[in-house]
Image (tube, grey):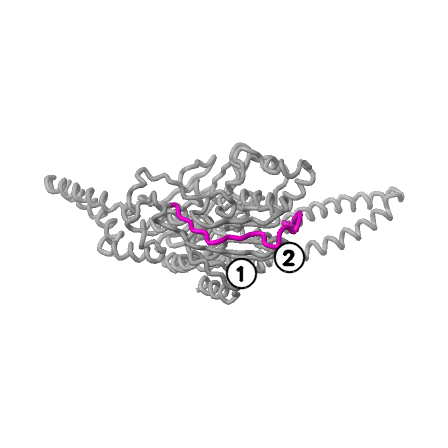
Amino acid sequence: MDIEHVFFAYGKTEIFNDISLHVNNHDHVGVVGVNGAGKSTLFHLILGDYQPDFGTITTSENTRIAYLPQVIKDEIPDMSITVEEYLKNARPLKELEAELATLYQEASVANEKKSASILKKAGKVQAQIDYFEPYKMEEQLIDLAIGFHIFDLLDSPLNTLSGGQKSKVAFARILFSKAEIVLLDEPTNHLDLESKEYIMNYLQKYPGIILVISHDIPFLNKVTNKTLHLDKQKHNMELFLGSYETFQKRIAEEKKTNERIAAKQEKEEEKLKKIIAKYIRGNEKKAKIAKDRQKKLARLEQNKVILERLSKKANFKMEIKEKGDFYPLRVDKITFGYTKDHLLYENISLQMIRGDRFVIVGENGVGKSTLLKLIMGTLQPLEGTVEIGEKISIGYYAQEHETLEEEKTIVEQFESITKEISFLRGVLGRFLFSGDDIYKKVSVLSPGERSRVALAKLALEKSNLLLLDEPTNHLDPDTQSLIAEVFKDYPGTLLVVSHNIEFVKNLNISKMLYLPSGKITDFDPEIIEAYEYLNEQ
C-alpha cells in the first residue's frame, strides 16, 4: 500500500499536509498520536470513505480491506442470522466457487486458444480459493470462537447479543476474513484480558498488513513491528522502525533534549535581560546593542512557547462538595436480566464505605456496564434494591459518552456548572483544549476528544461518588497517565470498570467485585501483575 503526497482538510481545518507512506506486505504498524491528530481520518482515507484533496492512495489489485471501527453499529441487513453464518460470510468462498464453475463451463465450449485464456483466469480464482483454506475453515472458525469466548454464541442470532458480544464477533469476523489489509481502531476497548491475550498471539502471526490505532501499550508492543506517529501540530506523520516501546524511548530522548535546551535558554534569557536593562538608556551604540538583544530575546521566548506546548499537561485536582453519607452505596440482593429467561446475575450485593475504591472485573457480556446503569437508576432490577446514601451526588462517566449532547459545543456542555468562560478556558486547557477548540460541537469531535470533555465535566461537578465505565478508552497513552494522576488523589468514593492494567494499578483500589458471581475480595496487586505478565508474553 502506498500513500503519496496526500493533503486533506475538513473545510478550513487542515488535517494532513503532504503525507507519504509505503507499507510492505506483512508490516504490522501501530498508529499513534494525540487525540484529534487524524488517526481515524487516515483509516477513512484508506477505505475510500473520504477522498484526499490532493495526492493518491493505492493498493495491489484485488486487495481486500477489513475495518474494525471503535463503535460497532448494527448495519447488517439481516440481524437475525446466526453468529456462525455471519463469520462464514466473511470469506467469499461461495462467490469464488461459483465463478470457478462458470469459467470451467465456458472453457469446455470455447476454442483451444480462448479456452487456454479462460483456464489461466480459472487458475487465479483457484489460487484465491486455496488462500482461504476451505478444508481448514471449520477448524479455524472454532479456534477463533474459543479464543474470543464466543463459542457458545455460534448458534445465537446477532440481534440477541450484547454490545460487548457484538464487538467480539465483529473482531473475530475480520480476522476470519483473512483480508490482505486489516484496519483496527481501538480493538481492545471491549475485550476481556483472556481474549486480548489470544488475539495478541493471533495477530503476531497474521500474514497480511495490519494498521492498528490503539492506546493499549502492551498490545502495541506485542503486535506491531513499526510505529506511525501522527503530529497534530505539523499535520504530518513519521514512520519509526520497532514497537511502541522503541518509539517511546526516542520521544523520551527528545524530551530530555528539549528540557536541556529550555534550561539553557532560561540562562540565556536572564543574561539578555540584564544587558538590555543596562544598555537600553545608553548612547546610540549601547542602545543598538540593547535592541539587538531584544530581538534575540523575542526569538528565545517564541522557542520557549513551543517547548512548553510540547510538555503541556492536564494536571487537574478533583474536589468534592461534601463528604456525604458514611455508606454512599448499598446494593442488596439484586437480580437482573434483559429477559427473565436469561439472567445476567442473581442476588448481587455490594456495600461501599465512604472513600472505598472498587474495581469491577469480569468477561465481556457479564453485565459490568449494566451494574453501573442499575446504580444510576436508568435500569431497574428484577429483584432487590439499590440505595444511594444521603447527600450523595453521583458522577457518571459513560463508556460511549451518551451523557454529552451532540449538537452543543464543548463550552455549552458546562452551562449548568459554570458560565465563567475565562475559568472554563483554564480548566479545558488542562484537558488539552485551546483557542477556538472550545466552540466545536461534540458531533465533530474524535472519540478521544469526547473522552476529555466528559472527564473535564466530571472533574468540575465535584460529585462524591464516581462511577467510571472504561474511562481510558480512546485516550492516547500520555493522556491516560495524566488522567490516572487526577483520579489517584480523588477524595470521594470510586467504582470503576476498566481493563487498563496500568490505570487500575495507579488508582489505590481497595476491593475487587467479580461478575457474574458477585464475589468481593480485597484488591490483590499480584492478580494485576499476573494479567500484566500475560499481556507482555
Query: Nearest the camera: 304 or 439?
Result: 439
| Mark sitting on residue 511 | 1
Prevailing SS of the magenta stretch: loop
Q: Which structural element holds mark 2?
A: helix
Q: What's drawn in magenta, residue-wise? A: 312-338
Q: Tag count in the figure?
A: 2
Question: Does residue 209 appear anywhere in the picture?
Answer: yes
Give x and y (percent) for residue 485: 61, 55
Q: Which structural element holds mark 1?
A: strand
Give x and y (percent) for residue 5: 47, 41
Q: Earlier in the sequence, mark 2 or mark 1?
A: 2
Classify 47 as above or below 245: above
Question: Does residue 229 appear anywhere in the picture?
Answer: no
Give x and y (percent) for residue 278: 87, 48
| Mark sitting on residue 257 | 2
Alpha carbon separation for disc pair 2 and 1: 42 Å
The amino acid at mark 2 is: Thr
Query: Nearest the camera: 351 or 500?
Result: 351
How many other residues sit within 10 Å of disc 1, few (<14), some (14-19) or many (≥20)?
A: some
